[in-house]
Image (cartoon, rainbow, N blue to C red):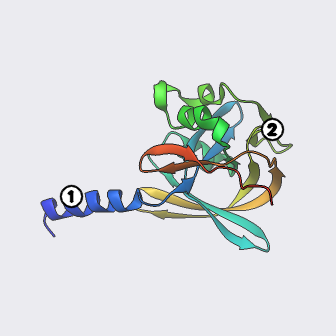
Amino acid sequence: MNQDQNQDLNQAFRQAMRQMAGGVCVITANDGEQRTGLTATSVVSVSMDPPELLISVNRTSSTWPVLEKAGRFGINVLSRAQQHVAENFSGQGGLRGAQRYADDDWTQTSEGVWLSRKALAVFACDVEKVVEHRQHALIVGKVTFIGVLPGDSPLTYWQGQYGSFAPPAAP
């Protein structure tokens, strides 16, 4: 495959992947006072017993070295009212590190994992396994804490835009 064919394939792949709507999560990581995080739609359930989740993190991101060293992380399932949080953690506006935590209400677990008090669901995870593949790290996290705050619609991402589902109609 020549370079032009590879670029065409990459562009087609990007466009095809944009057809998959995804729930928006913020992955949090900290090592002592150093905290950071990123916005992700790549969160997958791996196991129910024990509960495990898989995340995919680009190893060139500023979050990767912190997460790798910490050995634990948080997953925050954002509500439609938290689009600004998704934007903060995506690096929009040049926010880095702890600056990304502005404009939301955060708490720490006893193990030090940062979780949003306003998210629809939160998970604290210990790193169980890491598989490095190309520029990404696929991280299996063993869930150590779960919190659920039902009531709002989830924040979604589709075609490069944020959106949400309407809450289900009452029967």
Q: Quadrant of the N terminus?
A: bottom left
In this rendering, is residue 95 above or below 43? above
The numbered dot on residue 108 is 2
Give the secondary structure at mark 2.
Answer: strand
Residue 48: where, in percent of width, then height? 76, 72
Q: Amino acid at mark 1?
A: Gln
In the image, residue 97 above or below residue 147? above
Side of 61 where 83 appears, left or right: right
Query: Is 120 placed left or right of 97 in the picture?
Result: right
Indicate which label's residue lies in the foreground, 1 or 2.
1
In the depicted view, which residue is nearer to us: 48 or 77? Answer: 77
Give the tally of numbered discs: 2
Q: Position of residue 63 (x, y in %)?
A: 55, 42
Left or right of residue 150, residue 162 in this image: left
- What residue sits 86% from the left and 43% below the top? 110
The residue at the point 66 percent across, 44 percent down is 78
Instruction: Locate residue 14: give its quadrant.
Output: bottom left
Question: Neighbour class for label 2 at 10 Å: few (<14), some, many (≥20)?
Answer: few
Q: Tag 1's secondary structure?
A: helix
Mark 1 Cα-neighbour bin, 10 Å: few <14, some 14–19, many ≥20: few
Query: What quarter of the picture does the C terminus occupy?
Result: bottom right
The residue at 57%/49% (across/down) is: 156
Q: Pick whichever, 139 or 84, lies toward us.
A: 84
Across and down, in percent, residue 132 comes to 49, 62
Quadrant in the rendering for residue 86: top right
Q: Position of residue 95 (x, y in %)?
A: 52, 26
Kind of residue sitting beneath label 2: Gln
Residue displayed at 41% across by 56% down = 18
Whole-angstrom CA distance, mark 1 to mark 2, is 43 Å
Q: Which label was assigned to residue 7?
A: 1
